[in-house]
Image (spheres, rainbow, N blue to C red):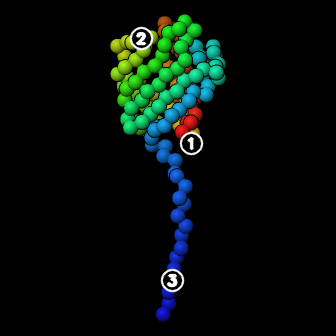
Amino acid sequence: MISIACGSRINSKKVENFNTMEGVWELSEFYHLANEDTLIVDTSKVQHKIYLDGYVIWNTDPAPDASEWHAYGTYTFKNDTIIEKLTSTSKSMKSDVNTYVIPIERGKNSYKQVNTYKNNDTIYHNIEVYKKIN
């Protein structure tokens, strides 16, 4: 009788799923650029985003003028793009636009998002780098 046994070890470590944004994310770096010139670099700004079960909520410390910035809504994540549909926002964010399409660069425990907008002939970029804290 011949007996052959093959053994393979199963790696029980959790595999990081890059197809989800679920979790709590903390802003670690913020850059504000105008026509590719850096206007602001801020590593002390406090901001958090929480993605859970298709919902998003985010907040930040009040601005120097005491305006508040926070929002709540739903999100989807596909092909390195987050789409946030905000249903409740602070007064400073109220507008006709409530859907934000945000391309991101995802790392193991971090991601970078670049929000681009234009005012007259100036192209602005807000670059936010987040680290995962849970």
Instruction: State the image coordinates of residue 39 (x, y, percent, origin top left).
Output: 63, 13
Instruction: State the image coordinates of residue 120 (x, y, percent, origin top left).
Output: 49, 6
Mark seen at residue 118: none
Amino acid at pointer 1: Lys
Which of discs 1 and 2 lies nearer the camera? The answer is 2
Mark seen at residue 4: 3
Indicate the quadrant where residue 53 lies. top left
Mark seen at residue 91: 2
Mark 1 vs 3, N-terminal side: 3
Mark 2 vs 3, N-terminal side: 3
The answer to whether 81 appears left or right of 11 in the picture is left
Give SS at disc 3. Answer: loop
**Visible in this render: residue 90?**
yes
123 versus 18 height, above or below = above
Q: Residue at x 35, y 22 (%)?
A: 87
User: How many numbered markers are drawn?
Assistant: 3
Front residue of 48 and 37: 48
Amino acid at pointer 3: Ile
Q: Are marks 1 and 3 in contact (CB under 8 Å)?
A: no
Q: Determine crowd level at label 1: few under 14, some 14-19, many 20+ residues with C-alpha closer than 10 A.
A: few
Which of discs 2 and 3 lies nearer the camera? The answer is 2
Mark 1 vs 2, N-terminal side: 2
Mark seen at residue 108: 1
Q: Residue at x 50, y 86 (%)?
A: 3
Indicate the quadrant where residue 94 lies. top left
Mark 2–mark 3 Cα distance, whole angstroms, equals 70 Å
